[in-house]
Image: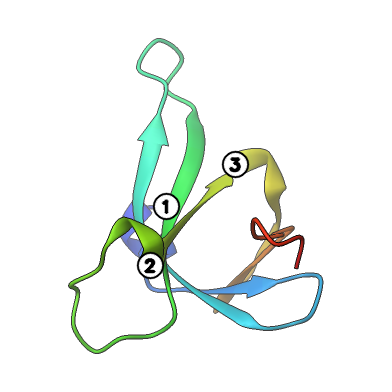
């Protein structure tokens, strides 16, 4: 699967079924080539302008399932939600 294919999928929170956002970046370990984290743009803004408060970092091991249209993740924000 290509990173561009991942970027087009909606990210869904396993805890409440809510859409969280879309992938805008990934952190890769250059020594191993493994993806460590994905960075999400929270919400669904029409513009690609976002600040750090509009993003979330999800560790790769918190991805539960990658489907045809969505990626389901185990996500809890800083408030414990």
Residue at 31% x, 60% y is 4
Image-quadrant location for residue 64: bottom right
Instruction: Locate residue 51, reporting x and y percent.
Output: 27, 62
Outermost residue, right direction? 15
Instruction: Locate residue 43, reporting x and y percent.
Output: 44, 81
**Residue 68 in sight:** no
SS category of the residue bearing label 2: helix
Q: Earlier in the sequence, mark 1 or mark 3?
A: 1
Which numbered mark, 3 or 2, is in the foreground of this view?
2
Quadrant that contains the C terminus: bottom right
Local crowd size for mark 3, using a 10 Å CA cut-off: few (<14), some (14–19), many (≥20)? some
Relative to 10, is 60 on the left or the right?
right
The vertical placement of 67 against 4, above or below, is below
Number of the label disc, if any, that sits on residue 19 = none
Residue at 33% x, 56% y is 52
**Residue 78 in sight:** yes
Label 1: which residue? 39
Local crowd size for mark 1, using a 10 Å CA cut-off: few (<14), some (14–19), many (≥20)? some
Could you tell me how far apart the alpha carbons at marks 1 and 2 are, in whole angstroms? 10 Å
Could you tell me how far apart the alpha carbons at marks 3 and 2 are, in whole angstroms? 17 Å
Relative to 72, is 4 on the left or the right?
left
Q: How many marks?
A: 3
Could you tell me how far apart the alpha carbons at marks 1 and 3 are, in whole angstroms? 9 Å
Label 2: which residue? 54
Relative to 25, is 38 on the left or the right?
right
Residue at 60% x, 41% y is 60
Label 3: which residue? 59
Which numbered mark, 1 or 2, is in the foreground of this view?
2
């Amino acid at each position: 699967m290509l990173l561009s294919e991942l970027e087009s999928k909606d990210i869904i929170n396993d805890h409440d079924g809510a859409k969280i956002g879309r992938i805008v970046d990934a952190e890769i370990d250059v020594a191993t080539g493994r993806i460590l984290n994905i960075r999400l743009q929270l919400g669904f803004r029409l513009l690609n302008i976002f600040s750090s408060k509009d993003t979330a970092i999800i560790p790769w091991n918190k991805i539960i399932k990658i489907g045809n249209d969505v990626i389901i993740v185990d996500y809890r924000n800083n408030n414990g939600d």
